[in-house]
Image: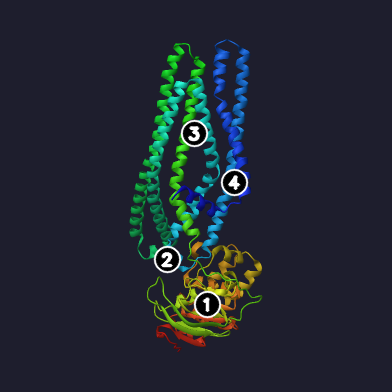
């Protein structure tokens, strides 16, 4: 990736308001510049204290220059604090807004996106990669400008003090910069490999931790421990290789520093013995050469850092501007939909493979309860994805109340279609907010009694109960009952229930069936199931395996 493309993508990702960015950058740069000037001036007081105070035995000069040195040091401390705080505030705002932008994007992608990316890889981008933008777009830019100015200023000053030493130090700096460039290209490739390994590692960690109870019950712990150890070893190897490459940068910089100081001391000692310069000046010049080391290394590290960020920026950009999106629409109705659904000759298959749905044609009307049955892979869950726009039909069309589903605004459509997923997923924080309301708890009490939820219901109604992440503190059956209650509360005109009674005992199943029958009237209800008992309340039953380009309803 060329630097021009890099900058273009970077600005597109962060979407910064140019005027605000420049104002903040100038403010931060000013603090950094004052701190830097103070830090550059600070060593010069040493030669004055030594040459004009100690050597000449002038106490007043010692007091004067020591006081000035102290004031300079205080300014260094104050403006160091200010530049660090302002840079963090400025950079953190950029990072958090970029994270929100990416998270918003993830809410608009379709199912094909999640077939393309691992969850762990996306989490790494969201949690780690974007964080690196903070320094890159704030302090790094100002520090780069300051360090370039420092290099020019200190080099010029050393040349003025001693042209012979100054020119030699500048030549060494150029050689160092050339070596840094070579190292940067190598570190970029190392970072790319490390980033892939990190994404794979995080994906495995996320998957196994989220499903740890299931893995424990199925006796997979020995296997996943070995897999985790292997992935740790792989990550350690890639991390070590990357660290070795980066250490080369540090070693080169240290070598420059050592050689430069040795040269200054040797040549300077000769000049002192020949009475060409004073001891205090040699002392100051040695410190300035050390000061030159820091900005030169920082510039080199910055070049390496940008190179290392190339693959990370690619990942962020490819996710943020991925084209696997839910089709946008702008239709919104002022009131809720009637809920009459029409599938007209719908064909669909995943990833250009065989068609799962072939010419599916059906109508689901308001007030109906429709049962959908079929073998695994016959397209039952696919119908739900098509209805919620996570997938797009390849042929045919889907309409709700006579309006093409692709023309609906996605957020509006989500207010009209309620889905009880196959795993009865509950967003813990949302459900716990319901539990904090006394009014909502009183409503729930009636539901819990009606659903034969006494034992669990009592603990829920105590007021200190919380649903844990991934529903870890409730059983599968309890999760299904609570998911049904949430669907009931949402009160949407179209309700889809995917295997709603799969985890229930026969008594609880009867209670849930009765609840659906009594409380979901005047809605379009679609029930996907393998269990025959719940099909008794359905007006119609559709067997998907009978579809081969025609219509057949049982």
Q: Position of residue 54 (x, y in %)?
A: 56, 13
Residue 115's label in the rendered image is 2
Disc 4 is placed on an element classified as: helix
Instruction: Give the vertical position of 28 relative to 38 (above or below).
Output: below
Q: Nearer the N terminus, badge 2 or badge 4?
A: 4
State how far apart marks 1 and 4 are (Cα).
45 Å
Foreground disc of the pair 1, 3: 3
Foreground disc of the pair 1, 2: 2
Q: Position of residue 157 (x, y in %)?
A: 52, 24
Mark 2 Cα within 10 Å, few/some/many (few <14, many 20+)? few
Residue 310's label in the rendered image is none
Disc 3 is placed on an element classified as: helix
Quarter of the C terminus within the rendering:
bottom left
State how far apart marks 2 and 3 are (Cα).
46 Å
Q: Which residue is mark 3?
A: 295
Q: Which residue is mark 4?
A: 90
Residue 496's label in the rendered image is 1
Mark 3 Cα within 10 Å, few/some/many (few <14, many 20+)? many
Q: Is residue 534 visible?
A: no
Are circles 2 and 3 on residues that touch, CB within 8 Å?
A: no
Q: Nearer the N terminus, badge 3 or badge 4?
A: 4
- The colour scheme is rainbow
State how far apart marks 2 and 4 are (Cα).
36 Å
Q: Is residue 293 visible?
A: yes
Residue 433 appears left or right of 264: right
Foreground disc of the pair 1, 4: 4
């Amino acid at each position: 990736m060329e630097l021009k493309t890099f900058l273009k993508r970077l600005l597109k990702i962060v979407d910064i308001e140019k005027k605000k960015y420049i104002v903040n950058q100038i403010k931060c740069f000013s603090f950094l510049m004052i701190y830097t000037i103070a830090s550059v001036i600070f060593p010069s007081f040493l030669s004055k204290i030594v040459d004009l105070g100690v050597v000449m035995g002038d106490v007043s000069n010692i007091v004067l220059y020591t006081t000035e040195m102290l004031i300079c040091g205080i300014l260094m401390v104050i403006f160091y604090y200010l530049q660090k705080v302002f840079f963090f505030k400025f950079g953190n705002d950029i990072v958090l807004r970029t994270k929100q932008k990416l998270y918003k994007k993830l809410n608009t992608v379709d199912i094909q996106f999640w077939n393309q990316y691992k969850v762990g890889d996306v989490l790494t981008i969201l949690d780690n990669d974007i964080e690196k933008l903070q320094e890159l777009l704030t302090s790094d830019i100002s520090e780069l400008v300051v360090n370039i100015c420092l290099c020019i200023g200190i080099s010029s000053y050393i040349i003025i003090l001693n042209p012979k030493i100054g020119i030699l130090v500048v030549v060494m700096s150029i050689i160092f910069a050339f070596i840094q460039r070579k190292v940067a290209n190598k570190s970029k490739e190392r970072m790319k490999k490390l980033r892939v390994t990190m994404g794979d590692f995080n994906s495995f960690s996320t998957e196994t931790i989220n499903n740890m109870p299931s893995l424990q019950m199925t006796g997979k712990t020995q296997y996943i421990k070995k897999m985790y150890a292997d992935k740790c070893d792989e990550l350690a190897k890639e991390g070590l290789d990357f660290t070795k490459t980066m250490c080369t940068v540090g070693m080169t910089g240290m070598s420059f520093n050592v050689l430069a100081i040795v040269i200054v001391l040797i040549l300077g000692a000769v000049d002192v013995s020949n009475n060409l310069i004073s001891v205090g000046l040699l002392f100051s010049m040695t410190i300035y050469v050390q000061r030159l080391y820091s900005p030169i290394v920082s510039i080199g590290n910055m070049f390496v850092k940008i190179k290392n960020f190339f693959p990370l920026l690619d990942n962020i950009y490819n996710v943020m501007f991925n084209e696997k999106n839910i089709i946008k629409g702008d239709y919104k109705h002022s009131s809720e939909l009637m809920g009459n659904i029409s599938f007209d000759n719908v064909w669909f298959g995943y990833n250009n493979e065989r068609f799962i749905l072939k010419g599916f044609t059906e109508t689901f009307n308001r007030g109906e309860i429709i049962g959908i049955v079929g073998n695994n892979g016959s397209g039952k869950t696919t119908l739900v994805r098509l209805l919620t726009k996570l997938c797009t039909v390849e042929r045919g069309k889907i309409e709700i109340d006579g309006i093409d589903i692709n023309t609906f605004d996605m957020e509006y459509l989500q207010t009209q279609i309620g889905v009880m997923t196959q795993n009865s997923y509950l967003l813990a924080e949302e459900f716990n907010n319901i539990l904090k309301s006394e009014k909502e708890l009183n409503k729930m009490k009636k539901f819990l009694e009606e659903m034969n939820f006494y034992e669990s219901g009592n603990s829920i109604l105590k007021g200190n109960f919380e649903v844990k992440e991934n529903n870890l503190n409730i059983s599968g059956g309890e999760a299904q009952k609570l998911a049904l209650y949430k669907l009931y509360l949402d009160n949407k005109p179209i309700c889809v229930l995917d295997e709603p009674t799969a985890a229930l005992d026969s008594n609880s199943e009867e209670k849930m069936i009765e609840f659906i029958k009594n409380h979901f009237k005047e809605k379009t209800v679609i029930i996907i199931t393998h269990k025959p008992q719940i099909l008794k309340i359905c007006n119609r039953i559709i067997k998907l395996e009978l579809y081969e380009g025609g219509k057949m309803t049982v």
